Image (cartoon, rainbow, N blue to C red):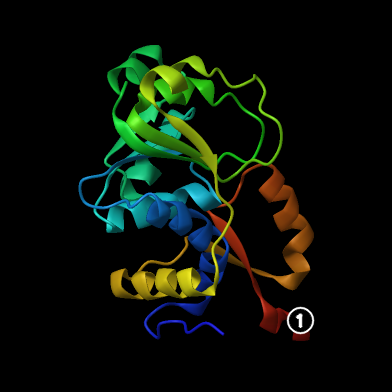
Amino acid sequence: VLKVPENLDPAGTAPLLCAGITTWSPLRHWNVGKDSKVAVVGLGGLGHMAIKLAKALGADVTLFSRSPEKEKDAIELGADAVVISTDASQMAAVSGKFDLIIDTVPYVHDINEYIPTLNVNGTLVVVGYLGPLDPMLNTVPLILGRKTVAGSLIGGLAETQEMLDFCGEHNIVSEIEVIKMQDINEAYERMIKSDVRYRFVIDMASLKS
C-alpha cells in the first residue's frame, strides 16, 4: 500500500508509479544531488520525469534530443540546457561533462555517441529500451575513461513511497492528458506517433458513459 501526498493531483500522480519510479530509482542509486551533472536522452513520458526529478534533487540537467523544437518544453520542465545530439559541435562542447546519463529512448538506437560526454567514472543507464544494442557497444571509451553502461527498471515499495513523498514536497506530478475510455484507440494511435505530452491518463468515470 502506498500513501499519495494530499497536495498532489491524483491524475498527474498516476504515472509517477511508472515513469516516476523508473527515473527516480537510478537517480537515487547513483546519488544524484546538488553537485551532480545529469543528462537525459529523449523527452517523452520517462524523459520529462527524469528532468523534473533530477532538477528537484539539485542537479545541473541537460537534455539530449534530436529535435530542436523540444528545447522550449525542456527548459520549462527544468532543464538547464539542451544539446542537439546530431550536432557534432554541440556534442563536442559537452565532452566529459556528465556524471550520469539517463537514456529514456524506447527503441533501438546508437548509445555510443553519448559515452564521450561522460566524466571519468560516469555512468550511462538505459531505462527505456530492452533488447540488443545496434550498433554494438564500443568498449574503448569505457575502458579508457572508466565509464559504465548500466540498466535499471523500477523500484520496490519503499523506494516508490520515497519518490511519492519527494514529489509531494516539491509539488511534482507528470504532465498528462486525461482521456475517456472511448478514446483509447485514438490515444493508442497518437502514442505510436509520439503525439502525447507526456502521458495519457484514462478517466475511469467514463466507463459509465
Q: Is residue 61 above or below residue 82?
A: below
Residue 118 location (% of width, % of height): 36, 28
Q: Is residue 85 above or below residue 31?
A: above
Residue displayed at 45% across by 52% down: 26
Whether residue 161 is visible to the viewer of this picture, yes or no, is: yes
Callout 1: helix, strand or loop? helix
Q: Is residue 119 left or right of residue 106?
A: left
Residue 176 location (% of width, % of height): 52, 62
Q: Is residue 149 left or right of residue 170?
A: right
Q: Is residue 73 above or below residue 156?
A: above
Which quarter of the rendered picture does the N terminus lie within?
A: bottom right
Q: Is residue 37 left or right of residue 101?
A: left
Residue 204 location (% of width, % of height): 68, 80
Residue carrying label 1: 207
Residue displayed at 46% across by 33% down: 148
Which quarter of the rendered picture does the C terminus lie within?
A: bottom right
Whether residue 209 is visible to the viewer of this picture, yes or no, is: no
Disc 1 residue crowd, few under 14, some 14–19, many 20+, Cα 10 Å: few
Q: Please tell me in which quadrant of the rendered image residue 172 appears.
A: bottom left
Residue 62 location (% of width, % of height): 33, 38
Q: Nearer the viewer, residue 139 or 67?
A: 139
Residue displayed at 45% across by 25% down: 114
Q: Nearer the viewer, residue 24 or 48?
A: 24
Q: Please tell me in which quadrant of the rendered image residue 99 appears.
A: top left
Q: Is residue 94 left or right of residue 176?
A: left
Amino acid type, callout 1: Leu
Q: Nearer the viewer, residue 201 or 162?
A: 162
